[in-house]
Image (spheres, rainbow, N blue to C red):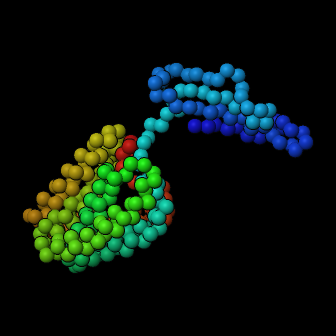
Amino acid sequence: MKLTYTNGAICDATSGTKAVFSINMYCDESMGWQDFDVSPGVLGNLCEPYVDTLSKVACSRLSVSQLWGYLAQYSQFFGAFLLVAGTILVFFGRKLLKPAVCFAGFLTTIFVSCLIFYGVYLENESDLADFWYFLGGGALAGIFVGLLMCWCMRVGAAVLAGWGGLTGGLILYESVLFRAQAEWLFWVTIVLCTAAAAVTAFFFLDQVVITATVMLGSYSLVRGVACYAGHYYNEVTMAKMA
């Protein structure tokens, strides 16, 4: 990490250049929180002097995958898809039950494909471009799975309800449970909410499907707007920040 002070005294009368002073802070995980080391004397030249420091305080405390930053570059495309899908789910989710169930199967397959990429294949930044192969493969398989869900409606409705429960769990954690400052609670919350919604759909199909499509559609609309407006981090990053 580097801290730079600008607009110093004129160091070169000929060009009128002003001095810039920098403090370089390097991370050392082996040091204690109270330990601090600094380079002997000021380094650099008259116009750009600097000192080097070494401390555990300079180490990053938030580690997230570079995949999220990579995907942010294409947020305008994902945003358009989420806005359209969200609008349909919110206002016509129950009337268009089969398309909604097909969408849930499609979304689930893509999610599994991305999970395989993220957890198994992705090892370094150079692999990020291969994400599109997994996304395309997941989309093609998702069409078949979505159609299969339409044939087995009760199972498809449970999957759709599970996505609604997942978004409900995200909202619950981000609004209330994040105060516990426990990342494991994030995963427990969304898993329990997803499972509870999916199981309940077998017994109260209409009520759960209506609620699930509204929850998933509303979340998609907000997330779609955030793709253009910004300032809405993905939930995994938010859990780590909490």
Classify residue 4 as left or right of residue 228.
Answer: right
Q: Is residue 47 visible?
A: yes
Place of residue 155 in the rendered image (x, y in percent of width and height, measured from the top left): 13, 67
Q: Is residue 110 above or below residue 147?
A: above
Classify residue 28 as left or right of residue 170.
Answer: right
Place of residue 189 in the rendered image (x, y in percent of width and height, measured from the top left): 25, 48
Quarter containing the N terminus = top right
Q: Is residue 221 above or below residue 183?
A: below
Classify residue 182 as left or right of residue 95.
Answer: right
Place of residue 140 in the rendered image (x, y in percent of width and height, measured from the top left): 29, 72
Place of residue 175 in the rendered image (x, y in percent of width and height, measured from the top left): 35, 50
At 32% from the left and 75% from the top, the residue drawn is 88
Classify residue 236 as left or right of residue 46.
Answer: left
Q: Is residue 152 above or below residue 161?
A: below
At 44% from the left and 41% from the top, the residue drawn is 62
Quarter containing the C terminus = top left
